[in-house]
Amino acid sequence: MTADRSGPARRLLLLAGLFMVVALLAGCAGLTPGSDGDANQEPEVPTPFQALAPEATSTETAPPPSPSPRPSASPTATQQATATPSPEPTATPEPTATPTASPVPTVDGTPREGQALVDALRGGGYVLYFRHAATDSSQGDNRVGDEWWANCDPGLMRQLSAEGEAQARAMGEAIRALGIPIGEVWASPYCRTMETARLMDLGPVEPTTDLMNMSAADVVGGAEAVAASARQRLAASPAPGTNTVLVAHGNVIAAAANMTLAEGEAAVLAPGIGEAGFTPIARVPPGEWAELAAQYGADGAAQTCEPTAPDQLGPFYEPNAPERDSVGQGHVLEGIVRSAADCAPIPGARIEFWLAGANGQYDDDHRATVVAGPDGTYRFESNPPPPYSGRPPHIHLRVTAGGHETLVTQYYPGAGQAEDTFDLVLVPLPGAAGEDAQAPVEPVIVKYPVPAGSRPHDVAPAADGGVWYTAQGSGELGYLDPETGETRHVALGSGSSPHGVIVGPDGAPWITDSGLNAIVRVDPATDEVLRFPLPDDSPRANLNTAAFDGDGALWFTGQNGVYGRLDPATGDVEIYDAPRGRGPYGITATPDGGIYYASLAGSHIARIDLETGQATVIEPPTAGQGARRVWSDSTGRLWVSEWNAGQLGMYDPAGDSWREWRLPGDRPQAYAVFVDDEDMVWLSDFGANALVRFDPRTEEFEQFVLPSSPAAVRQILGRPGEIWGAESGVDRLVVIRTQ
């Protein structure tokens, strides 16, 4: 607010009269669509608004008739061994982000200005309604295409002007400088309102049709419906210690609260007070936020540094972008990487950039990594980012620094803007502070050669620190000593073609051998080989993988359309026909001892009844997804590598629900899946020649590109701090060490 007190005094008189008007008109605010100056719409047939699709669905088929088990044969025994050496290490990537908290509010409907207004907002509890920033009035709105309101094409929809973009940034900067805590940020789904909210940079922006432009009210139930939903937003109390920001149109606040706002102007409302459900306490024109910051921003609360709002990673991220500060010309982005703890610069922070080229395509020529200087500064030059798939122009950023959470965000330039400043504020890791901050452990990839021609298929870390692996190419079981790099091989028998290996409750490796058509146990002390052949009427099951249930029985799969059970105590083997024939592949046990398998050809998972042996099919949301492997986390949720779909699937038996996530990259092929001791999900991606880590908490992927190509990691297993895989394409084992 200015030093001239005549303006504030006049506003107080206006507000006093406004309270009475709001009380009289709160229930009858159904304005006709028209002017926000957000009109200029052509009367076409509206396109229905599409709500967000649900995340998950599930179906379970009716159980098939009970299968008839086919009994077994007797075990046989032999012995044999050999030896060889050598490792060589290589290094790789990093981790992710979360928010902050604030004070306790004292909310009332007293009109405020100056310091009193700033103090009230610092306490939290208010709703700040912004009309979008200044626009180019020469542009009109046209109903073209689905969800036309979100179109950022200035030829079709009215956009922010250069003045409006600067206005939005300045308002956001001032609010942050004042130390005003912001919780939720909601915006009308129009491009100009979403852009205003994003440029203010007060937190993640959520679109809502509750604030839909009245000129498009017909799309979401009519003018009165929008007015009613907007009034509910104005009356809703924010989370304790925060203020809610709403960014919408002039005609919406006019209909909901009988207020007229200029472009960029804000109304500050106290929710839950007055007959209308809210009471205005102030109006703040766009330029007055900077005046408030200049006068009152020196207070302690004003010196906080708000973390940069995260934004989606998107599907085009690729790790290991080359270090360079330019991938083109025409647009310069610079700024300082800071810590939210004290706003101090973070030297040496790594900023990864990726954007579409001038042709609108993502490629390796438009990726770069920039290292922040000793003062935390960075500079990046590129071509002006073009619009992409109906989205406004943007540049993706991923920022990592020791002692801080990884930030994934996006920068949105203004139309025709050739340069801009974008500071990046990171959240400190718990317990980390300033110079004493401990950098997170950098995962390291180490590769170990195994004898040529081994074609290692599966791996199983042993209790003694070594690693078992199936040497499918030579018909042997291998053992690697990671300390020395030495290997030894145990012959499994003539015609052997071992597929899977796991370590059983007895500490011994158990192998599914498709060549021998048998389950094989090797004594870890003597290398004695014990074979459990499948029954004579089960020729060539094409055995794949195995898992022990809670009672110590070994369950296994055969791609030729069977699954089975071995009792290690008696040697009895029972075989069951899979309900949908060919396909049983990966198999896993849940913490309660239950057994599920994945069917590659059948594109489903199945639950096995341990009493009857009956398998019940569980359908995924994506038809034909090609469920190759499956693994359980500590809560019993099942994670599925969907080979055909290039997806990670998750089935939760507790809620009978599914969710799916597509892996990053153009052509992902999800082969193996494993869940580690921290419930992080690991996959092998043949399409990216990488191991991929998925964090279920943040729903973010991180790729670790493998040094050898094509690595062809067909299975992953691990122990605390280590993730092991077999590179069947190049006769190597690989481990990612995270501790």
Image (cartoon, grey):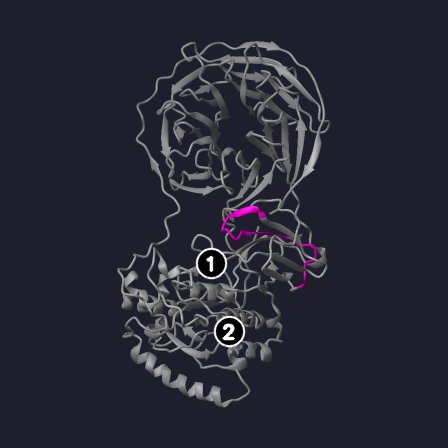
Residue 114's place in the image compared with 245, above or below, is below
Amino acid at pointer 2:
Leu
Q: Position of residue 539 (x, y in %)?
A: 43, 12
- Closer to the chain start, of discs 1 and 2, is 2
Q: Is residue 294 left or right of residue 595?
A: right
Give the residue drawn at x 63%, y 15%: 490
Is residue 220 a member of the stretch shown in magenta? Answer: no
At label 1, counting other C-alpha atoms closer than 10 Å, the crowd grade (few under 14, some 14-19, many 20 or more) is: some
Q: Toward which corner of the image does residue 561 lie, by quadrant?
A: top left
Circle 1 residue? 392
The amino acid type found where label 1 is placed reads: Pro
Q: Is residue 493 above or below residue 723?
A: above
Q: Which residue is mark 2?
A: 121
Mark 2 surroundings within 10 Å by alpha-carbon count, few (fewer than 14), some (14 through 19), many (20 or more):
many
| Highlighted range, magenta | 344-365
Q: Position of residue 693 (x, y in %)?
A: 55, 41
Quadrant in which residue 235 is drawn: bottom left
Q: Considering the numbered disc 2 on the image, is that residue within a helix, a strand or a loop?
A: helix
For the residues labelled 1 and 2, the Cα–Cα distance comes to: 32 Å
Q: Residue at x 36, y 24 (%)?
A: 614
* Residue 346 magenta: yes
